[in-house]
Image (cartoon, coloured by chain):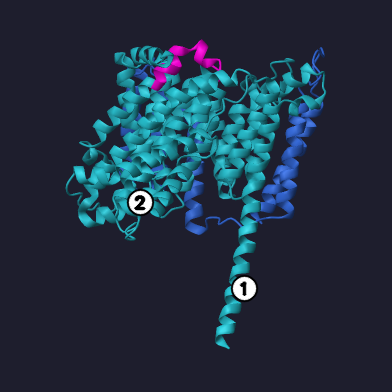
Amino acid sequence: MSDRILGCLAIAGAAAMAAAAWGYAAPVEYEPVGPRAFPLLLALVMASCGAWLALRPAQHADWPQGNRLGRITICAGAIVVYALLFQLLGFILATVLMALPAGRVFGGTWRQCIAGGIGLGIVLYLMFDKVLDVVLPLGILHWN
Amino acid sequence: METLSHLATGFGVALQPVNLLVAALGAFLGTVVGLLPGLGPINGVAILMPLAFALKLPPETALILLAATYIGCEYGGRISSILLNVPGDAGAIMTAIDGYPMARKGLGGVALSISAWSSFVGSIVATIGIAIAAPILAKWALAFGPAEYFALMIFSFACIAGLIADQPVKAVLATVIGLALSTVGVDANSGVYRFTFDSVHLGDGIQFIVVVIGLFSVSEILLMLEHAVHGPSAIPDTGRSMFNLKEMAQTWWGTVRASLVGFVVGVLPGAGATVASAMSYSMEKRLTDKEGTFGTGDIRGVAAPEAANNASANGSFVPMLTLGVPGSSTTAVMMGALTLYNITPGPALFDQEPRLVWGLIASMFVGNLILLVMNIPLAGVFTRMLKVPNWALVPGILAVSAVGVYGVHATTFDLVLMAVFGIAGYLLRKCDVPMAPLILGFVLGGIVEQNLRRALSITNGETGILWESPISIGLWLAAAAIVAGPPVYRSVRRRHQSLSESRERQDALLQGE
């Protein structure tokens, strides 16, 4: 079933690619192959792969269930939220906020995860921003 | 002779204090990343690459750091294989077969030191191989025109699809996804914006770092959650830490043989350390295992796959440096790192950037020496690292990855894209879509399209040029053989097997009568 869905998604993706690429044309044509050909070729190959998978699916993938699925969803959510808040909250606060759920799903206790997150945030901030000169956002901790 | 003078220049670069320091740092970090189960060389390189760029290291220093990390990972992978029976990366799977029984017998220290030694021999043999073979191959590759290049890229995609994947269709799909991602952004030839959807952030394409970190580091973390969360396991007492001369003599020829096999396998695009170590293990078993001790803690079964694994990791630099076609997904990432510096690996690299190429080769000699020296006395320190709990490790990896991605453009957009690639990568990997062809497609996408268009410009759109010269014909045939070979071989063998099985059944029936 997973293979059939993957195949259908590939066909849909290929169709969307082809539709978007159809209009690409160079303002001045000076070579026989323009910007449109390669994406269209890729869309064709992608659609054929998709069709193959949809028609001849192999063994079904073993998707996580129940508890495990919950943990993966929490972790994925934490990563997305981390990405969104990284600049806004600043590196240190965002890292503490991320380390809590990400540490919890990997078996840390509340206390360990909070302490770990604060430690990570501060140590990495000092190391990158102050020592290694990679500028990181301070976000709302920025006081002046 | 020319090679020696180039090597001297190379050592001049590699022995500069900064580069020595960076090589030692890379070697250490690589060993740590390699020994942590679940994290392999590609994660180590993927995490360090953006940092090297953000730290504004010069290209040769950055490359030395990444190469030392890569090789360090191959050293590190064996530690958890031997002590915990959990391979730190895919190349170290074979090492566990005899390494873990050795550790159970109280010979863990011997297994660790002999495998460090054989890793060293393997790497040095392969590095000598690079110094000899690469300039010759580069000279030969200068004769390649756009049509030959296009055929070469197709050949390397075929290698990856045919050799590593059980399901070639999914490998092809992965390659095409990678190629498609590479077309995002402004088209250099015509100035047309493709697949940018009027977003400023996509104008100059998808950042390589974002793709690599997302597909490899983030998705790896989600995959790690699937395996049961296990606490720190008991590490057996390692006993005597140094191998003796008898053990060295016992493993010597096997190590040399495995190093040569590993180098050759590493040079082939697509086949990597995993194939090399499996090949050399079964070869050693066939050649020397007269008493049937392989699998029960035979020291020769530890030395051989480790030598092969390291030799192939080093060997995979040859196609990257000479042809601009990476031999493994890790060298694909390194090639991406070079393009961040506007350096395009390929045959011209040896003429244009001799300091970079020979500095890298010399630093591989130096890096391996550092790793050998580091790995024997520090085995205890590395062993203790196995006890870092995941609840601290995972947020650390995520934070460092995010810093790396943020360091390039300082935009939230890139971070979100990283998260999206991470989740998409997880889903694709769950569907058995391999990531190596995807990253190879993404790295080579621009070059593939450019060469195709250039070739067709020569003939004004006539496609015959793509299979005109003997070199391209040879490459196309080789590509076809690699894709079609394994399935045909498998079906022939299956028929053969069922044939002999039915014959056995007949025999049994006859005897029964």
Q: In what element is the residue under mark 2?
A: helix
Across and down, in percent, residue B59 comes to 45, 16
Q: Is residue B287 left or right of residue A29?
A: left
Within 10 Å of the Cα at label 2, are there few (<14), some (14-19), or many (20+) other Cα atoms?
many
Across and down, in percent, residue A18 comes to 78, 33
Q: Label 1 near label 2: C-beta < 8 Å?
A: no
The answer to which of A107 and B485 lies nearer the viewer is B485
Identify the hue of chain A: blue
Name the amino acid type tagged 2: Ala
Q: Chain of mark 2?
A: B
Q: Is residue A42 left or right of residue B437?
A: right
Using the image, tell me which numbered label, if any, was put on residue B306.
none
Position of residue B402 relative to residue B192, above or below, is below
Can residue A134 be seen from the camera position used here?
Answer: no
Tell me the residue at 45%/43% (across/down): B276
Q: Main secondary structure of the magenta part?
A: helix
Residue B308 quadrant: top left
Name the amino acid type tagged 1: Ser
Q: In what element is the residue under mark 1?
A: helix
Within 10 Å of the Cα at label 1, are there few (<14), some (14-19), or many (20+) other Cα atoms?
few
The answer to which of B89 and B481 lies nearer the viewer is B481
* Nearer mark to the viewer, of 2 and 1: 1
Q: Which residue is denoted by mark 2 in the rendering?
A: B96
Q: Is residue B421 magenta?
A: no
Position of residue A81 relative to residue B137, above or below, is below
Task: Provide the residue span drawn in magenta.
Answer: B342-361
Chain represented in cyan: B
